[in-house]
Every structure is written in structure tokens, then in C-alpha cells.
């Protein structure tokens, strides 16, 4: 991977001191099992509170050049035996790099995914199914991150994926608006209703139109679509999209929601090491 590649990078996101908007440090702390954010291989009880108050300098933004992920970064996923767990790990990394506006790092992650997982599957259909899950995670993160940053990541990923593994049809177009709205409202309720800290009608009071866009567009058409990812993996996609965003309340709610629905999220643990190096 060329360290000089900066395609898709938004210079306005990099301050003069080399820091980006906060969040990516916390992501790598959690993903790597470093620092105060993890306990064993699960998100600790104190994670939510600490994520809301502790913001640190981002170590991967020391320059405008493409950061290089060290081999140690991938030791954790290599140790996972379950294919679903490994796909969630790769998906989470792709989403966070998209959210952090590092699409130029994605080719290295995809190469590792292809070498260590996709190429070992026994059929082209199986490989296409798995890469569809990575793409779907990015699509779902659009509702968190926005279309522009996600578009950079999707374009970079598409350049790496062979044509035979690319999507050829729009699955969401096959369902009716009413079907999508009903599923979206159910999914929205499942996420927030069990959390007593959430005021379910707050968005309506703020703006009925905003509430409509969130519930009947984003949750209906983006988040709740279950043709590719299950509920748990969708929750991870939304959560990792939020790590780079400076929105602690939403991050708290989604972390609590995942824990209430599925238990503490498993986090790969690595030996302490420099998380990224510059070539």
C-alpha cells in the first residue's frame, strides 16, 4: 500500500496538530483490547461512561499520508474460529475507517480479508455472500456517518472487489414502503424501548419531520433491512459508525441497546503494540 495515497481524504478533518475529530483512538483501544475501555474480551461496565468523558489525541493521524496497519493488528481476527465473528471484525474495521475518513487504508484490510478468509471459502457464491455483508455494514453506517464519507469507502472497496463478487441488483427495491416502515419501527422500538434513559417521543417534539426521516426512512430502509445482516451485526455496524462521531449520548444508547439485546459485545484482544505505523 502506498503511503502517499490520500484519495478521498478530507483535509478539513485534520487539524494543524495532526489530530482528527475524536473517536478513532477509542475505537482502536476497544478493538485492540488496550487501555481503560476493555476488560477481558468484552466491553467493560465503565466503557459507556468513559467513552462519554475521555477524549484522546488520535495516534493514527500524525500526517496526511496513508497509515499502515501493522501485522499485530490482525492477530486478533486470525485467532477467531467462527466465520461470523471474523466477518463482524472485518466489517467493524471497514466501517470505522469509513467514519474516520480513511478510505485509503481499506485496501490493506480487504487484502487481509481476501487472503485469510474469502479465498479459503469453497465457492464463489460463499465469497460473494461474505463480501456482501461487508458492503451492507457500510451501507447501514450511511445512516450514522453520512453518504459522502461512506461513498468514498464504498468506492475504494469496489475497486478492490473482483467484478464477479460485486452486487448486481438492489434488494431493498423489492419490498414495499409499508413493509419497510413496519419493520423499521419495530427495530427502532427494540433498540430504544428497553433503555429507560431514552425519551421515545423526544424526536417528535423536536421536529415531526425529523422523527419521520429517522424512523420511516433511516430505520425503515437503511438500518432494519434484514436481507443480509442479522440484528446483532446491524447493531455493531451502527455502533462502530458512531465511534468516530463526537456524539456521546447516541454512543451510550446504542452500546446499552446492544448489551440489553445481545449481552456484552465480544472484543478481539491483542498484545499492546503500536497500532499503526507510517511507511
Image (cartoon, rainbow, N blue to C red):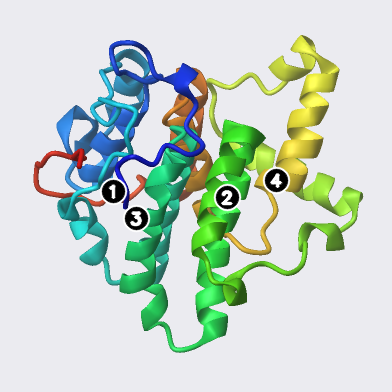
Provide the residue designation for mark 4. Answer: 222
Residue corresponding to mark 3 = 108
Give how far apart the Cα atoms at labels 3 and 2 are.
Answer: 14 Å
Q: Is residue 53 visible?
A: yes
Q: Give the alpha-carbon distance from disc 4 to disc 3, as whole Å.
A: 27 Å
Closer to viewer: mark 3 or mark 1: 3
Task: Name which residue lies at 36% across and 55% down.
Answer: 109
Report the front residue among 178 and 201.
178
Identity of the residue drawn at 37% across and 25% down: 23
Which image quarter: residue 52?
Answer: top left
Q: Mark 2 highlights which residue? A: 154
Looking at marks 3 and 2 on the same chain, the residue that comes earlier in the sequence is marked by 3
Q: Is residue 13 above or below residue 45?
A: above
Q: Classify mark 4: helix, strand or loop.
A: helix
Residue 47, percent from left and from top: 30, 29
Query: Disc 4 and disc 2: Cα gap in Å?
Result: 15 Å
Q: In the visual, does 175 lie left or right of 276?
A: right
Labels 4 and 1: the sequence-earlier one: 4
Amino acid at each position: 500500500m502506498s503511503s502517499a495515497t490520500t484519495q478521498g481524504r478530507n483535509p478539513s478533518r485534520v487539524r494543524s496538530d495532526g489530530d482528527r475529530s475524536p473517536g478513532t483512538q477509542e475505537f482502536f483501544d476497544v478493538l485492540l483490547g488496550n487501555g481503560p475501555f476493555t476488560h477481558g474480551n468484552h466491553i467493560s461496565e465503565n466503557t459507556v461512561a468513559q467513552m462519554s468523558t475521555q477524549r484522546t489525541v488520535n495516534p493514527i493521524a500524525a500526517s496526511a499520508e496513508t497509515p499502515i496497519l501493522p501485522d499485530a493488528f490482525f492477530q486478533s481476527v486470525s485467532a477467531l474460529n467462527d466465520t461470523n465473528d471474523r466477518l463482524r471484525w472485518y466489517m467493524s474495521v471497514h466501517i470505522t475507517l469509513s467514519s474516520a475518513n480513511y478510505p485509503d487504508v481499506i485496501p490493506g484490510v480487504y487484502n487481509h480479508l481476501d487472503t485469510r478468509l474469502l479465498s479459503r471459502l469453497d465457492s464463489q457464491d460463499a465469497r460473494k455472500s461474505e463480501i456482501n455483508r461487508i458492503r451492507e455494514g457500510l451501507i447501514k453506517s450511511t445512516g450514522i456517518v453520512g453518504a459522502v464519507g461512506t461513498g468514498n469507502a464504498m468506492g475504494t472497496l469496489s475497486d478492490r472487489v473482483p467484478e464477479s463478487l460485486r452486487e448486481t441488483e438492489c434488494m431493498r427495491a423489492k419490498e414495499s414502503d409499508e413493509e419497510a416502515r413496519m419493520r423499521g419501527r419495530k427495530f427502532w422500538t427494540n433498540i430504544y424501548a428497553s433503555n429507560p434513559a431514552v425519551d421515545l417521543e423526544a424526536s417528535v417534539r423536536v421536529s415531526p419531520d425529523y422523527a419521520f426521516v429517522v424512523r420511516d426512512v433511516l430505520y425503515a430502509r437503511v438500518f432494519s433491512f434484514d436481507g443480509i445482516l442479522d440484528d446483532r451485526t446491524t447493531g455493531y455496524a451502527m455502533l462502530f459508525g458512531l465511534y468516530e462521531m463526537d456524539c456521546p449520548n447516541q454512543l451510550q444508547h446504542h452500546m446499552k441497546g446492544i448489551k440489553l439485546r445481545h449481552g456484552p459485545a465480544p472484543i478481539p484482544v491483542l498484545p499492546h503494540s503500536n497500532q499503526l505505523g507510517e511507511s
